[in-house]
Amino acid sequence: MTKHTPIKSAGPNAPAIWGGKLPLTLPAFILACMATPAHAGMTVYDLTDVARLRLEDISFYGFLLLLATLGIRLLWNFLARDFSRLPRLSFLKALSLTGLLSLLMLLILVMISGAREILTPGAWYCQGSHYRPNDVGNREMRQQSIEALRAALLQYAHTHDGRFPPHDYVSEIPSKVWEAPDSSGTRYIYVAGLTLGQSNALLVCEPLNFGQQRLILFADGRIQSSKTEEIHQLMGVQEQR
């Protein structure tokens, strides 16, 4: 007969392997998270830098949303102890309330931005879905800057058979002359391929961050102030030609 060795009991205080006081699944999970992926010569599809940054932003704001949800839920349920009329919030209800409050705050901020643009016209310019300060020089400084560029362009044209530069990076004109008078040093918008004979052709205009009323330079040397819509029309007519 085969003798069976009795299995000794580990006792009530011994750690359990799968569901007791010392689970092995937690260290295994931590080690799995710390492990680096092994490609082993297989085709790897990775995100671009822009997509990775977008994903990081979404993850960060998602974490903030969940954190704010927990804070609102704890605060609401704490107040519900003293006010019997207040119902207790579940996590899903707290998440819905946090989302509604976030949308309301976004709407208020958009309204404040619009009112700020109305009260201080020209001091802010729209970039995407928000406004940025229009930290450009005054009118006199802008006039002097575009006049300096006009002098450089006319001098170039007179020495090149009436033709203006093929691009705005020619060595004959310093790079500083192409920069508009704002804090970021934005370059002027230049229309290449023109000559002195095209008197009504738009040659240079100020960049978009100078507001709706911008200074423009024609091929014959005239400088005037025009709206953005008029500048687009002039460029459209020249492109059709």
Image (spheres, rainbow, N blue to C red):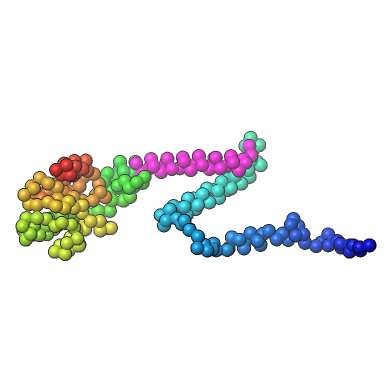
Q: Is residue 169 magenta?
A: no
Left or right of 228 on screen, residue 53: right
At horizontal 73% and vertical 61% (from top left) the residue drawn is: 22
On the image, which quarter does residue 116 sit in? top left
At horizontal 50% and vertical 63% (from top left) the residue drawn is: 41
Residue 76 in view of the camera:
no
Magenta extent? 87-114
At horizontal 43% and vertical 43% (from top left) the residue drawn is: 106
Which of these two is toward me, 146 or 233? 233
Percent x, y of residue 189: 21, 52
| Residue, far right | 1
Percent x, y of residue 236: 19, 42
Left or right of 118 on screen, residue 205: left
Q: Does 235 appear above or below 4?
A: above
Residue 105 in view of the camera:
yes
| Residue, far front | 1
Total of numbered circles in the picture? 0
At horizontal 74% and vertical 55% (from top left) the residue drawn is: 19
Left or right of 1 on screen, residue 20: left
Percent x, y of residue 163: 9, 55
Quadrant where the C terminus sits is: top left
Q: Does 67 appear above or below 81?
A: below
